[in-house]
Amino acid sequence: MKILIIGGSYFLGLAFAEAAYHAGHSLYVLNRGNRPLGVSTIPEYHADRRDATALEAFPAGAEGKPLHFDAVVDFCAYQTGDIRLVAEHLNATFDQYIFISTSDVYRKGSGQVLREDAELESRDFGGDAGAYILGKVALERELAELTSASDCKFHSTIFRPAFLYGQGNYAPREVLYFQWIHQSRQVLHPRDSEGFFQMVSAEDAARAILLSCGNETCYEKTYNLAAPTLYTYESYEELLRQATGIDFGLAPVTVEQVLQDGLPLPFPLSKAESEHYDGSAVTALGLTYSDPVPEFARLWELYQKQVAARSGNDGAN
C-alpha cells in the first residue's frame, strides 16, 4: 500500500512508521521537520499542517498528477479544522483517513464499561487537558461530517488508545518510574489510592492501525485500544518489579499529599476519575494484546544503556 503519515516522527507515529516500513509498504511523511525521520527511502514533506497554501503545494507524482494514497494516518490533529484542512487542501487523493484520537473522549463518570458507542464528553474541564479532550471530540465529529457528505471520496477509521507505553514515550510514565528505581531504589506509592487504569503498548497500537489500513471492514469504524488488565498502583509496581528484577522499596504518600504538593504520579488516583474500556473489538482485526512484562524489561534495559551512555559522555567531557 501507499500510506501518508501525518506526524510520524516520534513515539506512536514512529512506531507505526517502522512497522509499516518493515511490512514493505510505500511510505510518505508530512510533518514540520522538527524531528525528521531521515530515512532516504521515505519521502518527507516538511510543512505546517494548518497552512492551506503549504498543503496545496504537496509534491505531485508522475506527470504532475496528485499522488493517491491507500490511507492517510493522522497522529497530530488536535484542533477543530485540522482534518478538514487536510481533506480539502492537500494536493493528493486518498481512500481512507485514519485518525488517532484518545480514550479520554468518553464522558467521564458513567461507571460503565466504555465501548465505542458510549457517549462522548461535552464538558470543558479547563486547562490544556480540557482543551485536548474537547479538541479530539470535535475532530471525531469533523471527520464524521466529512465522510457523511454525498460527494466525499474517502472513508474514515478512528482509534482511541488508553495509556500508551513504549520506546520514546514523551509522557512521564514508565521513564519516571525507571528514574526513581535507578536513583533511589524506591518509588512514590499513594497508599490510599483507589484509582485504576488500562494500558496499550505503542507497538500493539501500531499493529492495529496497520491492520486497518486498506481494510474495508474498518471503514466508518472506531476502535478502542486498551488491553483488558485493570492496573492499580500496586499491580503496576509489581509489573515493574518483574520487568526490572529489582525489589525496590515504596515511599508512601497519601492522595491528599499528592494533590497538595503536586507530586508527579501519572495515573488516576481515585475511583471517580478512573474509566474501564472495552478494547476487544480491535481483536477481530487479528490483534492480540502483548504481555507488558517483556516490553517493560526491554524498555528498562534501554533506559539503563542511555543512562550509562550519558554518564560516559559526561566523564569524557
Image (cartoon, rainbow, N blue to C red):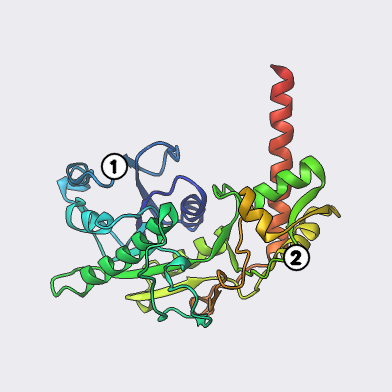
Viewed as shown, does residue 254 lie left or right of 40?
right
Q: Position of residue 121 (x, y in %)?
A: 39, 71
Residue at image coords 18%, 52%: 89
**Residue 263 visible in the displayed image:** no
Please state, as top left, top right, bottom left or bottom right, where the N terminus lies in the image. bottom left
Residue at the right extreme of this rendering: 247
Viewed as shown, does residue 20 lie left or right of 304?
left
Number of disc labels: 2
303 relative to 143, above or below: above
Badge 2 is on which residue?
A: 234
Foreground pick, 258 / 288: 258
128 relative to 97, above or below: above
Please state, as top left, top right, bottom left or bottom right, where the C terminus lies in the image. top right
Query: Looking at the rendered structure, which numbered label has been put on residue 48?
Result: 1
Q: Position of residue 116 (x, y in %)?
A: 43, 78
Viewed as shown, does residue 85 lie left or right of 112?
left
Query: Which of marks 2 and 1 precedes in the sequence?
Result: 1
User: How crowded is the residue under tag 2: few (<14 C-alpha within 10 Å), some, or many (20+)?
Assistant: some
Residue at the top extreme of this rendering: 317
Under mark 1, the amino acid is Asp
Mark 2: secondary structure? helix
